[in-house]
Image (spheres, coloured by chain):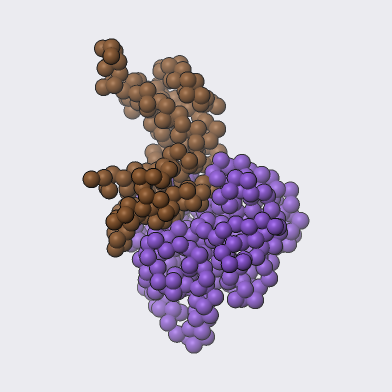
Amino acid sequence: MSVLGLFKRKQPKGSSPDQSRDRGILVFENTSEVIRAETALKKEGWKIRVMGPPPEVRSGCDLVIEIPLIEELSILRTLRAADVTPKDIVPVSSPLLRPVDLFQTKELGRYLMIRAANMKLTIDKRTLTIVNVSGGGCPDVPYLAQEMVGKPLADAPSPREIGHTLCGYALQLAYEEVKRQCSP
Amino acid sequence: MLALVGTVPHRDFPLVDSELSLHDDEVCIQGEQVTVNRGTPALLAATIKAGEFLGQPAPHGYLVGDIGLGDGSRRLYEYLIQHLGESDFQAITFHYMQPDIGCHNRVLFVMEQMSERPILIADAGSMYAAKMSGKATAYDLFTPDIGELAFLADEEAPHPFYTRGFILHEENRVPELIARAYAHKNSPQTLLVKGEQDYVANQEGIQATINHPMDEAMEAIGGTGDTLTGIVSALISTGMEIGEAATIAARANRLAGHYAEPTAATQVMEIVSHIPKALEDVFCEKNRGEGWQKLSQRESAASALK
């Protein structure tokens, strides 16, 4: 491994979006493309943030990726390699909406329920089986419930893999928190 | 007649526009079947069950398959824009749809041109779209849970996922959140908030609270909010006043859940089957002037917002 390779693993690429004055957002066709792009960029070590879009590009169930604009070309190269292309790149100057980052945990006897934003995931603490998914309002929520409920946490598909909307993204957060709390 | 609009979690499910029926645990429409589980299928099943008890005609369904890509929802929005204006529904309940501000506004415009505007009820993605587009006041009833109420109360948030952290989603903050949602005009005429306690509220404040029976596991069961929206829709379609329908529906939904002896692993169809018995018991209590009515009135007096 090269010295540069080592450095790449320790230091995320790009200046911090918080510190940069020249921030931009990548706008995608739908949330599943955002999730794919986020996965590809993070895998390559880019320091990016998934945020809410500003009102002028908001259409409904949206997420955008905030990037340092100066890194635009390199970031687009990474995305092209991952076969996911933004439909627009927009500079931003005003603060973007932050996704919710609070969790609520409720013990229900042998079950544990975690809520992230409007999504709740419940597991059987003894068997680590997903027993219910509740909350949410986007059309992938019933689909995610159908695919996840009744399966052990270790075998169930993650919402990141099969979800497409902000509700799916929120369920992913609850899913990660359940895994964190249930890890040995 | 009542119409129900929503999506089912099967990508190949065609766009259908017809009368709905329920056979065992399957909703049937236009030769298609969908198993009752959380989401719009739970709403459909609960509405049908409640409607049967109330002696109402079968509800009409506008359904399409959508697993979250929004393709089915967009087809259904376009279909509604073309066809809803020809209908004469007394009430329409909008449910799991991909929130899309532009499409939502075009459907709403069609309904506002109808000679008799139907009563408009929204939950799930349709409620998100109504709030996102700044058109919440055009609706008659929303049925949010506490997380969704916090979203309605946050005038900046375009989706519950972006509700700002200082707007806490806690049971003891519900009256404050309701007041804030109305202050920013992000609420319809009536709110039915589902949670540990259910609240019926309007611009004047909280009109009723319903907290019995209390089965904590209900919150974890996917679809219990959908059944509540279904029951209240069926009651409203009888011509009942919306606040009264919301109070009866909240009590009946709790009772149906209680009769299922729920755990956090209970599935919603187990609750749907108890809806007729629960409604029967609530109407008996109401006729006797017992229980829920006195309780809700007493509590509403104590917690009314000024």
Residue at image coords 31%, 23% = A12
Quadrant where the C terminus of chain A lies?
top left
Residue at image coords 65%, 61% = B28
Above/below status of A142 relative to B196:
above
Kindly give the residue lying farthest to the right in the view shown: B86
Camera-side residue: A73 or B202?
A73
Camera-side residue: A71 or A93?
A71
Residue at image coords 61%, 41% = B71
Camera-side residue: A57 or A86?
A86
Residue B285 drawn at (x, y percent): 48, 83
Kindly give the residue lying farthest to the bottom in the view shown: B288
Which chain, by letter, is brown? A
Residue at image coords 63%, 46% = B12
Which chain, by letter, is purple? B
Residue B278 visible here: yes
Quadrant where the N terminus of chain A lies?
top left
Number of numbered labels in the structure image: 0
Residue A106 visible here: no
Residue A48 occupies which quadrant of the picture?
top left
Residue B193 occupies which quadrant of the picture?
bottom left
Above/below status of A98 relative to A115:
above
Residue B122 drawn at (x, y percent): 56, 57
Residue B126 drawn at (x, y percent): 56, 52
Say left or right for A58 vs A94.
Answer: right
